[in-house]
Image (cartoon, helix red, strand yellow):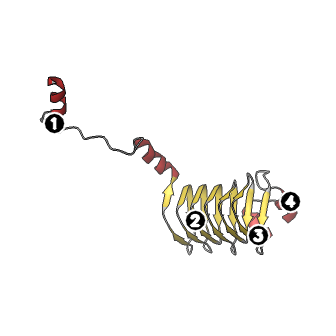
């Protein structure tokens, strides 16, 4: 399974080279199918997970293998899901394969969902959420509406006579 998934991440010439360097020259960390991790994972490189992780994952690129099960929040530039992921995904690019089961919100710039994939949660485009935040006020309170044309503003008149 490693060579197939290594190719999905763009690794070149063999599993040994793929384990040392990912596509961007960043290290590739592989969590095998027989491994279960309870705790958060942080790396600046690329990760391939074929086992089980209960915790948050932060990395540059993440590949979730077909037999993998992740419970926790994922933050990465690129995420490919072929297995099961329960939790929020925050990434620039997300690909959910037909074998995947994702339960949780997906916040992304680019999204691809193959036919047959299972997806339950909200899909939020980052550029759209940025525009919504630009219009929001600092404390979330709305400003009072301007009076309709033709009707006097009582607040202004009261301020002028005081």
In the picture of the structure, the residue carrying the numbered disc 1 is 149
**Inter-mark Cα distance, 3 to 4:** 14 Å
Could you tell me which residue is drawn at 42 percent across and 41 percent down?
A: 138
What whole-number distance in Å separates the C-alpha atoms at marks 4 and 1? Answer: 72 Å
The answer to which quarter of the image holds residue 73 is bottom right
Label 2: which residue? 87
The residue wearing badge 4 is: 17
Between tags 1 and 3, which lies in front? 1
C-alpha separation, residue under disc 1 versus residue under disc 2: 50 Å
| Residue 129 as seen in the image, left or right of residue 91 | left
Mark 4 or 2, nearer chain start: 4
- Of marks 3 and 4, which one's residue comes earlier in the chain? 3
- Marks 4 and 1 close (CB-CB < 8 Å): no
Instruction: Say which mark, if any, is on residue 119.
Output: none
Distance from Cα at disc 3 to Cα at disc 2: 25 Å
- The mark tally for this picture is 4
Q: Secondary structure at mark 3?
A: helix
Which residue does the numbered mark 3 point to in the structure image? Answer: 4
């Amino acid at each position: 399974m490693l060579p197939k998934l290594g190719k999905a991440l763009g690794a070149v010439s063999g599993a040994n080279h793929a384990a040392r360097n990912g596509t961007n020259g960043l290290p590739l960390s592989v969590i095998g199918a027989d491994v279960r991790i309870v705790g958060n994972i942080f790396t600046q490189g690329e990760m391939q997970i074929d086992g089980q992780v209960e915790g948050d994952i932060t990395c540059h690129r993440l590949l979730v293998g077909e037999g993998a099960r992740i419970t926790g929040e994922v933050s990465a530039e690129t995420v490919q899901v072929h297995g099961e992921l329960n939790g929020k995904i925050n990434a620039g690019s997300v690909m959910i394969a037909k074998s995947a089961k994702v339960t949780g919100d997906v916040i992304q710039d680019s999204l691809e969902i193959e036919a047959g994939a299972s997806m339950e949660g909200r899909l939020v485009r980052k550029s759209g959420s940025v525009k919504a935040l630009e219009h929001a006020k600092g404390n979330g309170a709305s400003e009072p509406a301007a009076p309709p044309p033709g009707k006097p503003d009582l607040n202004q008149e009261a301020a002028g006579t005081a």
